[in-house]
Image (cartoon, grey):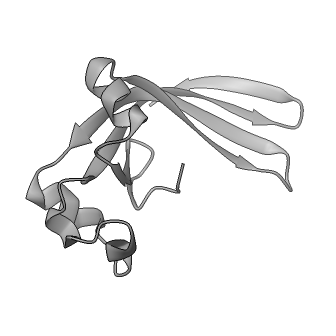
Amino acid sequence: MLAPRVREGFHAFYFTTNTSSMRVAQFRHEQRASVYFCDQKRFEGVMFKGTMEVLEDPASKELIWQDGDTLYYPLGVTDPDYCVLKFTCLSGRYYNNFSSKTFEV
């Protein structure tokens, strides 16, 4: 999974992916999801739990489009195989220094 292109604090993260991917089909059926970020050098990480939406509207696609994306989506921002995944965080768990803490967002 690629790093999020846009984020709204810790409440929402936007990713780019192929509409034809296995995960898009999965998230259309079941929106529950989690994302995990880690810093391997500091041996810490955070897992967010929430929901994942598949967005195909022009505004969402324009929001995270970057130069060079035509390498993956040759038809540009309107490519039907290009979509946005929006992860909305509900809670999480932070790990650091051999302990973890659960939190609500």
Which residue is depicted at the point 82% across and 51% down?
40
Which residue is depicted at the point 69% across and 25% down?
101
Residue lying farthest bottom?
A: 67
Question: Which quarter of the figure has residue 82?
Answer: bottom left
Q: In the image, is residue 77 above or below residue 22?
A: below
**Image-based side of 67 in relation to 95, left or right:** left
Q: Locate the C terminus and report the quarter of the image it occupies.
A: top left
Residue 70 drawn at (x, y percent)? 32, 75
**Image-based side of 5 in relation to 38, left or right:** left
Which residue is depicted at the point 41% across and 34% down?
23
Residue 95 drawn at (x, y percent)? 75, 33
Q: Nearer the viewer, residue 61 or 101?
A: 61
Question: Which quarter of the figure has residue 68?
Answer: bottom left
Q: Nearer the viewer, residue 20 or 97?
A: 20
Q: Nearer the viewer, residue 66 or 19?
A: 19
**Image-based side of 27 in relation to 77, left or right:** right
Total numbered badges shown on the rendered structure: 0
Which residue is depicted at the point 33% across and 18% down?
30
Residue 16 drawn at (x, y percent)? 36, 55
Residue lying farthest left?
A: 58
